Image: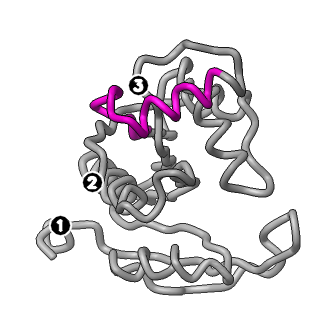
């Protein structure tokens, strides 16, 4: 069952949980300092989190216990289960990052994050969206195709950890007709 979640803008106090998810999700995670910079750069950077609305749900209680054990921190009221980032510059909505905690994958939360970031981009004047995705990440590519992203290029050796190429994907235009589909 998909947990009831709330999407909201990322705050500085979310950084420890976000970094933890990032470390579980990517071989070259962003640093806490990078997230701090992005949060403080609200003109172009838009970071969101998904948090459990009912933090007494059994999975949420287990997540909070694990987080406390790993970090020693009790600084959150509801566990964050996913996050995403988008840079909005000159009409381009560039999806910079998106991840869901492994415990909560396969529940549609990544799609919820993507849809939320696209809606926010449209509301803020985004005209089109781009992103990079690992060539080997076929599940992410399937999600992006569902939202009408098309492969428009290939970035050779884009990922520093292993030199894997990335597809450059794009969807345009982000307009009323796109929202209706």
Crowd around label 2: few <14 · some 14–19 · many ≥20 (10 Å): some
Residue 179, numbered label: 1
Q: Is residue 63 above or below residue 92?
A: above
Q: Estimate the spatial distance between the alpha carbons at disc 2 and disc 3, rounded to whole Å.
A: 24 Å
Are circles 2 and 1 on residues that touch, CB within 8 Å? yes
Residue 96: name its quadrant: bottom right
Q: Nearer the viewer, mark 2 or mark 3?
A: 3
Q: Is residue 102 above or below residue 155?
A: above
Q: Secondary structure at mark 3?
A: loop
75 or 152: nearer the eye?
Answer: 75
The CA span between labels 2 and 1 is 8 Å
**Mark identifier at residue 74:** none
**2 or 1: tag closer to the N-terminus:** 2
Above or below, comparing residue 14 to residue 58 in the picture: above
Residue holding disc 3: 78
Residue 100 appears at what percent x and percent y?
Answer: 51, 52
- Out of 27 and 176, give the one closest to the viewer: 27
The residue sitting at 66% across, 37% down in the picture is 20
Residue marked by disc 2: 119
Which badge, 1 or 3, is on the more N-terminal residue? Answer: 3
Q: Secondary structure at mark 2?
A: helix
At mark 1, the secondary structure is helix
Of 79 and 28, nearer the camera is: 79
In the picture, measured across the screen, residue 7 lies left or right of residue 141, that is: left
Q: Residue at x 21, y 67 (%)?
A: 175
**Number of marks in the image?**
3
* Within-10-Å neighbours for mark 3: few <14, some 14–19, many 20+: some
Location of residue 93 in the rendering, given as x and y in whole percent from the top left corner: 44, 57
Residue name at image x 54 percent, y 86 percent: 152
Q: Judge from the rendering whether residue 136 lies leftward or rightward of residue 148; answer left or right.
A: right
Span colored in magenta: 49-68
Give the position of the C terminus as an image quadrant.
Answer: bottom left
């Amino acid at each position: 069952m998909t947990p009831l979640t709330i999407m909201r803008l990322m705050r500085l106090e979310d950084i420890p949980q976000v970094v933890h998810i990032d470390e579980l999700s990517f071989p070259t995670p962003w640093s806490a300092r990078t997230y701090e910079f992005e949060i403080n750069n609200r003109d172009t950077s838009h970071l969101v989190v998904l948090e459990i609305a009912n933090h007494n749900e059994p999975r949420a209680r287990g997540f909070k216990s694990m987080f406390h054990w790993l970090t020693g921190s009790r600084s959150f009221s509801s566990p964050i289960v996913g996050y995403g980032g988008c840079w909005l510059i000159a009409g381009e909505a560039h999806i910079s990052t998106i991840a869901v905690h492994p415990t909560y994958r396969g529940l549609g939360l990544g799609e919820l994050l993507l849809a939320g970031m696209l809606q926010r981009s449209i509301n803020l004047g985004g005209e089109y969206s781009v992103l990079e995705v690992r060539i080997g990440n076929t599940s992410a590519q399937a999600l992006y195709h569902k939202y009408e992203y098309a492969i428009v290029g290939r970035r050779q050796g884009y990922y520093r950890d292993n030199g894997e190429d990335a597809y450059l994907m794009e969807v345009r235009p982000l307009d009323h007709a796109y929202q209706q589909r």
